[in-house]
Image: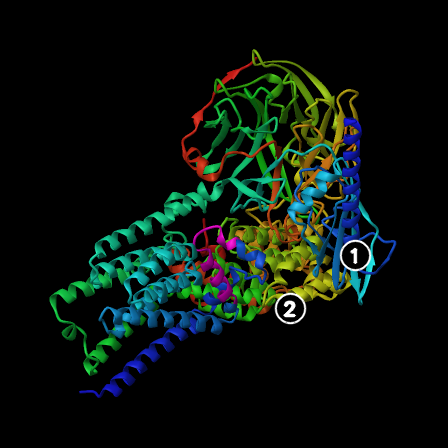
């Protein structure tokens, strides 16, 4: 008897819920004016069509890039969410609560956007847009540096973090609080906001390391190394950071379509022991006849991957092409093993940069372009994927005709964030792509902003976008003292 | 004894004449300076742009300042706005003094005088003057309130807002209000109020620096007051900020020693004359110590370069006293553009090849240094200088215009579109932006634009790297042997470097550029070279002018006469041949 009553109760609940949904749909449909459908795809700016998004992303506000008197977008899914946003200027500003509910009730699945525009008192509906909400969340925060894509000059710059669930952006460090110096190469250990580092240059030079709630400032330059650390990668244990040390020069091209060439005349790789404050290297990582750079650890910490090229005379620097190698590493003894060639890009007349390995250790994402190592100023630079299990290279369908460059994986390996200049060829923007379990990278979408026209009016580039799992509990006030302090000198110890 | 009405009339006439002088000083003497201020900022009619101004205390100053500075595009409008601001400062000053029982027009004019000194310096932007105006507006309003409680409420509620609005300019208001309460009000609790006022003034900036703003500790109480000014400007700034507190103290102590009646000087003939004398002295100090004629000429030259009014560039260059790299650089550019470079460049001061380009430095020269590359059709380099200038100085119309034109030239339309969008949001550059915007929607229209068309025809196809110490003229000529400006600059650089061997190697190319005669300085150099090297090199199809040969013989004769005494030789040759290449070659810029 009890069972029957319970069943009846459930049925009643479903019945009531269905009626409510029906009423919601009716009320929503009643809001829709009479319209005619056209078999045409609408142009949205940014392009948020046919994309896969995480369930915890901020509202994807956009502009309807069509000339019209009025605009209307209906958002709906198969689970009863249905709301309409109206606009007179084409800017669709989605309320956070409605958006969150839409994603929560969709995941995993699809939601739909019906775009209507009114022309000469007639409403027209474009083809319905279908977007996919994945069950894989993205790490909550994105850290990046904002700086003008200048040649040599810089003015105001800062390292910021953006809450990806809303539009909150807060500075981690601003150079206005450190006498306008340059700062760069912020890096996290396994997407962990509690273990990070970045470099200060110039007057307050040194590497700021944040670990276990402690801040230290280290001078990684020793008399045995070329320069202080530059490109960096945290060992998964957090006990080591691999750095390149570079003597970098910039030159300025004369032909249209090319602007700057940034290249190394010298470069080595060092490993910094965060516990012992010791810098070390080995012959394979500091061959004076070769240029070693862009170190990155394998997720198990047993290999250090890096790019390496034969040093070329300055007048034929454009023949400098980097290949991918790895060297075995013993974290216990901090010693290096044998070098293994992973991918010889130079055989194809190409060069590679920024190797990054997925957290599961299977894929390696990297940039490939014509020559040199500074991919951001190479419009032909694209992202490629190396399957480390079979060493096959593929080109994911996330590239554009302009530069794709710096990229990182999310902590789960299901999301990629990468820099792209596809918008105008100059200003770098962060794009996200869903990387599914079959190894396919889905159509990317740009970091959403409250105002759809934000990027068009924004004159700074997003450098080194790094996904982090939680908020970085640092801000310029907290960092002001340590950045102004004298750095502790690291000591050098050869590993050979 | 002057009648009261006449007293007022003579006072007003004196004041009127002072403000007319003030207006004319900025309208005439600082004309180019005023216009230059406009070139250093860009006011956008876009609400999104407003929020950028609020990241630091005093942001509203920059916003209001930028709004008003946009009108400085017309120097007379700029002078009028600067004068109007000064006049309002004067009115408030006068009011503040009167409220403290001091009626002296001359003293009320002191802040105006200090503002004139400060605004003669291009580093003191108009925003700063607005900051000062808002400071004394606040204090004027404060002393207007007679009821003590209301006055306290006004201070405790108003001063924190004032700090947020004008930053460091609000700090003197703390002192002013505190002194006013302590010295000029009779409330029993005035000592406590004094202390509370001071505590508020210290606490609010400190708290806001820890919860609202990210600001260095050393700027919490001063930003955006430009204490980085030098010399007279810095003294004037400090004096301006301490002037009112100082006066309050002075008035208070004067009150102690004499009655108010005796203290206020009557406006009679003698005091009028004294006032006139003081005003004259103020004008003198501004003109002699604050005004920089050299800077004004430089900015004038720069203004005409932007307008491509080359004759006016040369006219101003003639007026410039002494040698200045920027002036020489612009003069050489104007000489080329007027077709006189190879005939007249040694009539002007020369400092070697450094006079053909500016040094690559991350300072204000970035805004000027790209001009020569633009006219040389070295488009990437012109773009680079413009971009760096925008990074260094912030968004400004000059850099944007150059970035747009060079981007269109290079076919880089998305970037051009982005920058055009900014100019489209302005009052005075919208029309310009709309014109160039048509080139994006219909690229064929750009073919009718003479500058873009010219620079496109000379686009670089064989890549090379920019040389920060030279001009890549050789590379430009390899790419486009028909680039006449590159050729003339190349030959000029050879002459300036005194490299006659290389000059002679390239002289035969003049026939490729349509010269009907050998340019005079080329003749001079070649005659010297032939004589020195015992050669008879003459470009095919050309001959030397008899006049040049005669002058050379005369030069050689004088030189031979004083060969053993170079100082006398230089003096004698300078009289008749000081503007020849021979004179430069032998006596100028010798290492």
* Subunit ID for the residue under disc 1: A
Q: Position of residue A369 (x, y in %)?
A: 73, 35
Q: Position of residue A22 (x, y in %)?
A: 80, 47
Say what secondary structure mark 1 lies in: helix
Dots 1 and 2 on the same chain? no
Mark 1 and mark 2 in contact? Answer it, CB < 8 Å: no
The N terminus of chain A sits in image quarter: top right
* Direction front: furthest residue: A1
Q: Characterize the local packing of mark 2: few (<14), some (14-19) or many (20 or more) Cα atoms within 10 angstroms.
A: few
Q: Characterize the local packing of mark 1: few (<14), some (14-19) or many (20 or more) Cα atoms within 10 angstroms.
A: few
Residue B255, image quadrant: bottom left
Q: Nearer the viewer, residue A269 or A459?
A: A459
Please give the range of residues in magenta. B52-70
Task: Answer left or right for A26 relative to B51.
Answer: right
- Read off the residue under disc 2: B431
Q: Is residue A91 magenta?
A: no
* Direction top: furthest residue: A333
Can you see residue B578? no
- Read off the residue under disc 1: A30
> Residue drawn at (61%, 26%), measured in percent from left and top?
A190
Q: Is residue B54 magenta?
A: yes
Q: Position of residue A6 (x, y in %)?
A: 76, 30
* Subunit ID for the residue under disc 2: B
Q: Nearer the viewer, residue A495 or A84?
A: A84
> Residue drawn at (20%, 83%), measured in percent from left and top?
B269
Check the image and report above or below for A32 versus A358.
below
C-alpha span from label 1 to label 2? 45 Å
Task: Answer left or right for A389 relative to B47.
Answer: right
Q: Which mark is residue A328?
A: none
Say what secondary structure mark 2 lies in: helix
């Amino acid at each position: 008897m009890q069972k029957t009553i319970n069943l009846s109760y459930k049925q009643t609940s479903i019945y009531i819920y269905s009626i409510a949904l029906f009423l919601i749909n009716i009320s929503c449909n009643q809001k829709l004016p009479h319209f005619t459908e056209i078999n045409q795809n609408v142009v949205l700016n940014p392009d948020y069509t046919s994309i896969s998004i995480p369930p915890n992303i901020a509202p994807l506000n956009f502009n309807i890039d069509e000339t019209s008197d009025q605009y209307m977008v209906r958002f709906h899914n198969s689970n009863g969410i249905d709301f309409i946003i109206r606009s007179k200027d084409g800017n669709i500003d989605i309320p956070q609560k409605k958006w969150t509910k839409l994603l929560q009730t969709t995941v995993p699945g699809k939601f739909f956007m019906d775009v209507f525009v009114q022309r000469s008192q007639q409403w027209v509906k474009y083809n319905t847009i279908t977007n996919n909400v994945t069950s894989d969340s993205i790490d909550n925060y994105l850290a990046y540096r904002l700086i003008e894509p200048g040649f040599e000059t810089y003015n105001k710059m800062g390292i910021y973090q953006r809450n990806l669930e809303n539009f909150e952006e807060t500075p981690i460090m601003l150079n206005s609080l450190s006498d306008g110096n340059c700062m760069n190469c912020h890096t996290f250990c396994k997407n962990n906001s509690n273990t990070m580092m970045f470099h200060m240059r110039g007057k307050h030079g040194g590497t700021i390391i944040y670990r276990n709630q402690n801040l230290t400032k280290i001078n990684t330059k020793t008399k045995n190394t070329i320069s202080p650390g530059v490109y960096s990668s945290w060992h998964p244990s957090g006990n080591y950071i691999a750095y390149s040390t570079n003597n970098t020069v910039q030159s300025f091209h004369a032909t249209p379509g090319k602007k700057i060439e940034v290249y190394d005349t010298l470069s080595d790789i060092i490993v910094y022991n965060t516990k012992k404050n010791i810098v070390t290297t080995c012959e394979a990582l500091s061959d004076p006849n070769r240029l070693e750079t862009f170190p990155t650890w394998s997720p198990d910490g047993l290999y250090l991957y890096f790019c390496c090229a034969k040093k070329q005379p300055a007048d034929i620097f454009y023949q400098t092409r980097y290949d991918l190698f790895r060297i075995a590493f013993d974290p216990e003894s901090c010693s290096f093993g044998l070098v293994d060639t992973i991918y010889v890009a130079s055989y194809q007349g190409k060069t590679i940069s920024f190797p990054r390995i997925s957290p599961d250790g299977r894929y390696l994402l990297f940039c490939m372009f014509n020559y040199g190592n500074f991919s951001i100023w190479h419009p032909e630079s694209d992202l490629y994927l190396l399957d480390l299990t079979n060493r096959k290279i593929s080109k994911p369908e996330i590239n554009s005709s302009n530069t794709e460059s710096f990229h990182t994986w999310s902590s789960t390996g299901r999301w990629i964030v990468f820099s792209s200049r596809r918008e105008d060829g100059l200003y770098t923007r962060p794009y996200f792509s869903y990387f599914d379990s079959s190894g396919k990278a889905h159509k990317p979408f740009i970091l959403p902003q409250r105002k759809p026209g934000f990027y068009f009016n924004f004159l700074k580039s997003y450098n080194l976008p790094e996904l982090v799992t939680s908020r970085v509990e640092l801000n310029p006030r907290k960092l002001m003292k340590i950045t102004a302090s004298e750095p502790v000198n690291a000591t050098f110890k050869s590993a050979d | 004894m002057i009648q009261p009405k006449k007293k007022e009339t003579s006072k007003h006439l004196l004041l009127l004449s002072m403000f007319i002088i003030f207006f004319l000083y900025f309208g005439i003497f600082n004309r180019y300076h005023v216009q230059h201020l406009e070139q250093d900022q860009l006011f956008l009619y876009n609400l999104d742009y407003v929020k950028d101004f609020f990241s630091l205390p005093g942001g509203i100053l920059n916003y209001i300042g930028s709004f008003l500075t946009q009108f400085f595009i017309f120097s007379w409008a700029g002078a009028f706005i600067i004068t109007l601001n000064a006049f309002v400062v004067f009115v408030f000053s006068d009011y503040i003094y009167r409220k403290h029982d001091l009626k002296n027009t001359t003293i009320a004019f002191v802040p105006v005088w200090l503002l004139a000194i400060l605004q003669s310096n291009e580093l003191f932007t108009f925003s700063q003057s607005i900051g000062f105006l808002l400071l004394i507006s606040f204090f004027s309003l404060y002393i207007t309130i007679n009821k003590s409680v209301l006055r306290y409420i006004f201070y405790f509620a108003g001063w924190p807002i004032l700090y947020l609005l004008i930053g460091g300019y609000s700090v003197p208001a703390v002192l002013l209000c505190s002194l006013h309460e302590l010295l000029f009000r009779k409330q029993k609790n005035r000592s406590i109020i004094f202390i509370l006022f001071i505590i508020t003034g210290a606490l609010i900036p400190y708290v806001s620096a820890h919860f609202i703003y990210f600001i260095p500790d050393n700027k919490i109480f001063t930003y955006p007051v430009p204490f980085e000014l030098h010399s007279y400007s810095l003294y004037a700034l400090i004096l301006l900020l301490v002037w009112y507190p100082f006066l309050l103290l002075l008035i208070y102590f004067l009150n102690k020693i004499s009655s108010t009646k005796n203290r206020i000087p009557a406006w009679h003939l003698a005091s009028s004359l004294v006032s006139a004398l003081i005003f004259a002295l103020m004008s003198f100090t501004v003109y002699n110590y604050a005004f920089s004629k050299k800077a004004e000429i430089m900015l004038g030259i720069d203004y005409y370069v932007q307008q491509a009014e080359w004759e006016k560039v040369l006219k101003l260059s003639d007026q410039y006293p002494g040698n200045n790299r920027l002036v020489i650089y612009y003069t050489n550019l104007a000489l080329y553009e007027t077709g006189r470079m190879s005939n007249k460049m040694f009539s002007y001061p020369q400092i070697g090849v450094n006079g053909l380009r500016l040094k690559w430095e991350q300072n204000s020269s970035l805004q000027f240094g790209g001009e020569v590359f633009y006219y040389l059709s070295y488009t990437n380099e012109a773009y680079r200088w413009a971009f760096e200038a925008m990074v260094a100085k912030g968004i400004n119309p000059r850099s944007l215009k150059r970035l747009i034109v060079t981007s269109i030239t290079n076919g880089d339309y998305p970037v051009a579109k982005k920058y055009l969008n900014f100019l489209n949001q302005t009052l005075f550059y919208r029309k310009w932006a709309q014109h160039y915007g048509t080139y994006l929607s219909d690229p064929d229209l750009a073919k009718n634009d003479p500058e873009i068309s010219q620079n496109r025809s000379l686009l670089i196809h064989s890549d090379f790297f920019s040389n920060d110490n030279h001009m890549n003229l050789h590379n430009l000529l390899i790419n486009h042997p028909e680039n006449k400006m590159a050729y003339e600059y190349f030959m000029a650089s050879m002459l300036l470097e005194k490299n006659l061997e290389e000059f002679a190697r390239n002289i035969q190319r003049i026939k490729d550029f349509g010269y009907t005669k050998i340019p005079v300085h080329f003749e001079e150099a070649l005659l010297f070279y032939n004589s020195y090297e015992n050669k008879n090199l003459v470009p095919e199809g050309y001959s030397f002018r008899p006049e040049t040969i005669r002058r050379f013989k005369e030069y050689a004769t004088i030189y031979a006469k004083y060969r053993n005494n170079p100082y006398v030789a230089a003096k004698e040759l300078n009289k008749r041949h000081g503007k020849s290449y021979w004179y430069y070659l032998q006596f100028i810029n010798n290492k």
